[in-house]
Amino acid sequence: MLLSRPLCRSAAFVRPLRSISIKTLRRNASTEVAEFKGTKNADGKYTVTMIEGDGIGVEISAAVKDIYAAAKVPIIWEAVDVTPILKDGKTAIPDVAIDSVKRNLVALKGPLATPIGKGHVSLNLTLRRTFNLFANLRPCRSVVGYKTPYDNVDTVLIRENTEGEYSGIEHVVVDGVVQSIKLITRPACERVIRYAFQHARATGKPKVLVVHKATIMKMSDGLFLSTAKEIAKEYPEIELGAELLDNTCLKIVTDPEPYKPVVMVMPNLYGDILSDMCSGLIGGLGLTPSGNMGDEVSIFEAVHGSAPDIAGKGLANPTALLLSSVMMLRHMKLNDYADKIENAVLTTIASGPENITRDLKGTAGTKHFTEQIIRRL
Ligand SMILES: NC(=O)c1ccc[n+]([C@@H]2O[C@H](COP(=O)([O-])OP(=O)(O)OC[C@H]3O[C@@H](n4cnc5c(N)ncnc54)[C@H](O)[C@@H]3O)[C@@H](O)[C@H]2O)c1
């Protein structure tokens, strides 16, 4: 009885959001999702938006630019500043930056510091919402030369990036009682699951694994799971599996080997947590690339933060941003350049502590590490 009035209010609050979301998502739904549709300029090069970001962002972006110039990658960087502006009382990305990403259809992004305090929406969340980046792709592969308890990690995780527990629908029911709504829509499920199957097909992985808690979240995760069963019919050569989140965590940290032939796909919060866990298996966020995939544009980013403690000191490790840029090159079908740069990064890391940065237990600074990569191109 106590809850009836606020619940009615919450239902009224949710209805318009759901209808907007489904309409928007339906409009964007297509069988081929998140494909790069950019074209070369007259000079044979692609223009790519570069969001250098805050803190060490400037240093690691400079390393990427130097390596790309040395590798003669046919890319022109268009640097934009995404320092937020307030538009109608809400945090927004400046129009110049939005126009650049929309024009180029692809961006590489350094870390953005989130100011702590009331009223600041995370810029990373704002970017995902602005460009409808519906899938977060996070591959984690063991890096030779950086020893962790595992040397056989090769996981690929795809996280639904726009809804679920991160829909931001929260309210106080009565003092001391709050409610948070996990929003799951069929179009968003379809899109991210279809992307997972496409990715499995493109990378030769024979299985898509839905990670869920449909035993508890019967309706929301149940919808995610049942949608996966429908979409799987379009990809008969790829096996569909399903596993409970807790079980997946237990099994991956026990032995990551069985996850090598698998593309995992899951709702937002589970993906947020499990992707960081997988990063931990290979040595942390400094080695982990990621891609935020959308139907129109995609933004590739290092998942670590702006590292204010070492900013400006020449100590930053550019590996995560470089490997994110390698994912970007593959998305743009510039595979030869991707292979060349990835190989140079990995062989440099394997070459010994004198050539790698301190976060990887080495002694080098950003400049020396970058020079060593260029030598190995
Ligand atoms: N994707 C993003 O843009 C993103 C992600 C996480 C945090 N942040 C923001 O970054 C700021 C700092 O966050 P934090 O301190 O919690 O996390 P952080 O990732 O910036 O730093 C954590 C630790 O890791 C080290 N580190 C991180 N990246 C490194 C690199 N490339 N090379 C060497 N060392 C590296 C740092 O020196 C620090 O000791 C915050 O404002 C936060 O909101 C942004």
Image (cartoon, rainbow, N blue to C red):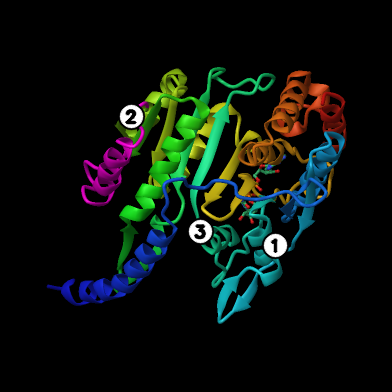
Taking depth in this image into account, of 303 and 48 the one nearest to the observer is 48
Dot 2 or dot 3: first in sequence order is 3
Where residue 329 appears, as percent x and y from the top left, is 67, 39
Residues drawn in magenta: 212-237
Q: Which mark is residue 132?
A: 3
Q: Looking at the rendering, in which quadrant would you find the N terminus?
A: bottom left
Taking depth in this image into account, of 374 and 272 the one nearest to the observer is 374
Q: CA distance from mark 1 to mark 2?
A: 39 Å
Task: Using the image, determine if residue 155 lies above or below residue 289.
Answer: above
Where residue 295 appears, as percent x and y from the top left, is 51, 53
Q: CA distance from mark 1 to mark 3?
A: 16 Å
Please report the residue visible at 71 percent of the width from the left and 38 percent of the height from the top: 322
Callout 2: SS:
loop
Q: Residues within 10 Å of mark 3 (few under 14, many from 20)?
A: many
Instruction: Answer with the quarter of the image where residue 288 lies.
Output: top right
Where residue 62 appears, as percent x and y from the top left, is 82, 46
Callout 1: SS:
helix
Left or right of 270 in this view: 297? right
Taking depth in this image into account, of 98 and 81 the one nearest to the observer is 98
- Return the residue at label 2: 236
For the residue marked with disc 3, what is the amino acid? Asn
Asked if residue 227 is among those painted magenta in the image, a careful observer would answer yes
For the residue marked with disc 2, what is the amino acid? Pro
For the residue marked with disc 1, what is the amino acid? Ser
Left or right of 218 in this view: 309? right
